[in-house]
Amino acid sequence: MKWSVCTTGMKDRPLEDILRLVRAWRASGAPIEGLEIWVGHLEPYAARGPSALEELASKLADEGLAVPVISGYTYFSRSPRDRDADLQDVRRYAEMASALGGPAIRTFFGHLASRQASPELWDESLAALVEARVIARGMGADLLVETHYQTFADSLASLRSLLDSVPGGDLGLIFDAANFNPDHFDPLDVLREVYPAVRHVHCKNYHWNHEAWYQSVPVSAFDPSGDVDNDRVLRELAARGFEGFVSLEYFGRRGFSALLQSLEEARWRSA
């Protein structure tokens, strides 16, 4: 497997600044082989036309950096008008992906917990998700659903239903072990069942506050005091032959410190 970094946690920095950071990290030995890029970081390039994105793709390739995923924020569940807007966004993201050489596009599925979704809302949202996949695939990209709390992809049961419901049975997932912690699910139980659908992985760690989720404290990916045993997750992935990217994903000032420590820990594990 290969290491990448998510730029979604650095929304306040332009992509050029992030690339300078990545160069410095790699020069110090961080095993970064890819960038998972937030669509907001790509918008300035897209505004200048496809050639600007193609130039960015060439620059990244020259530096030996792949783009496994571009990260959008679509849900397909909020309202009919919002679903239409999500479909338009997917088309726009697919244009970006095409110019970058066809990386996958990250989406969420649903804007609330699966247990709160009525059968009607689930079916309407699923139909929009399926349509979005057709749009993306028609432009050379795939659409991957991230496993995440407070979405329709938040539990093993909901993921089984989702994977069984998508035509072709080939929906891809972004597996995030930490996102099962809020609901007290063991991520390995989920991973072992949904592994055939896993195309990409997010990696982070927290001291989770179950009384106030957004007051949880980020710690480095392999900090043994954290609530996520990423060593076990990565061993499971390696045992199953996973060869894709594992993206370190952190947010905020404290998250940035945890990201730096995680890069050092990843270097030790890659030595």
Image: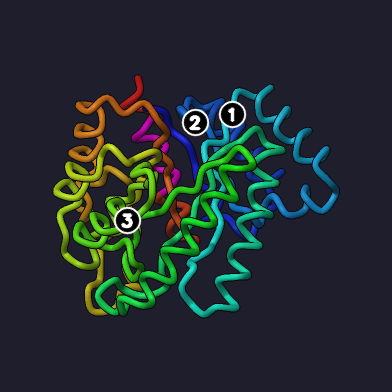
Q: In the rendering, at what x and y percent does residue 135 appear?
A: 59, 50
Q: In the rendering, at what x and y percent does residue 95 appear?
A: 70, 46
**Label 3 near label 2: C-beta < 8 Å?**
no
Amino acid on which disc 2 is placed: Ile
Magenta region, residue range: 259-266
Q: How many marks?
A: 3
Mark 1 or mark 2, earlier in chain: 2
Q: Is residue 160 placed above or below 68 in the rendered structure? A: below
Q: Which mark is residue 226?
A: none
Residue nearest the viewer, comparing 82 with 96:
82
What is the distance, in whole Å, between disc 1 and disc 2 at their CAs?
8 Å
Q: How is the image coloured?
A: rainbow
> In this rendering, would 90 be left or right of 57?
left
Mark 2 or mark 3, earlier in chain: 2
Q: Which quadrant would residue 62 be assigned to in this image? A: top right
Q: Which mark is residue 165?
A: 3
Single out the residue that lies furthest toward the top. Answer: 271
Residue nearest the viewer, comparing 266 with 126:
126
Mark 2 crowd level (few <14, some 14–19, many ≥20, 10 Å Cα) = many
Identify the residue at horizontal 57%, vertical 36% (top origin): 67
Q: Which residue is under mark 2?
A: 32
What is the distance, in whole Å, between disc 3 and disc 1 at their CAs?
35 Å
